[in-house]
Image (cartoon, rainbow, N blue to C red):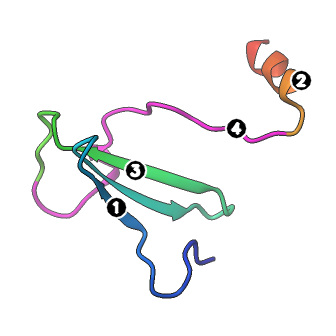
Amino acid sequence: ADLLREGQVDTFHSTNWQADQCYFADPAGNILELIARQTLPNEASGAFTSDQILCVSEVGLPTTAVAATVAALQA
């Protein structure tokens, strides 16, 4: 599924964060974001691979049952 409307791009540069972001959908249709922070010592050359992912900073879990979801995660 396309994330964007015709004529738009899915990569963005943030001057304030000194980072580049890329948005895409996984096979289940969830929207994911990768951020390349320019201020970290993580320079790489060649094609991007999953081995270059350094960490997961946050995970969003949209739900209409917030309290139940929090309780399930805490358990």
Determine which residue is flagged by label 3: 34
Q: Is tag 3's residue or tag 4's residue first in the polypeptide sequence?
A: 3
Magenta residues, as a range?
45-63
Q: Look at the numbered disc 1 and give the secondary structure of its residue.
A: strand
53 to 5, vertically: above or below:
above
The residue mark sitting in front, 1 or 4, is 1
Q: Is residue 33 left or right of residue 47?
A: right
Determine which residue is flagged by label 1: 12
The residue mark sitting in front, 1 or 2, is 1
The N terminus sits in image quarter: bottom right
For label 2, the crowd category at 10 Å Cα-Cα, with few meaning under 14, some 14 to 19 and many 20 or more, is: few
Question: Please, what is the three-letter code of the amino acid marked with disc 3?
Answer: Leu
Foreground residue, 49 or 15?
Answer: 15
Q: Look at the numbered disc 3 and give the secondary structure of its residue.
A: strand
How far across and how far down the image is residue 30, in percent?
65, 56
Q: Is tag 1's residue or tag 3's residue first in the polypeptide sequence?
A: 1
Q: How far is disc 2 from disc 4 in space, using C-alphas?
A: 12 Å
Magenta part, dominant SS: loop
For label 3, the crowd category at 10 Å Cα-Cα, with few meaning under 14, some 14 to 19 and many 20 or more, is: few
Q: Is tag 1's residue or tag 4's residue first in the polypeptide sequence?
A: 1
Question: Please, what is the three-letter code of the amino acid marked with disc 2?
Answer: Ala
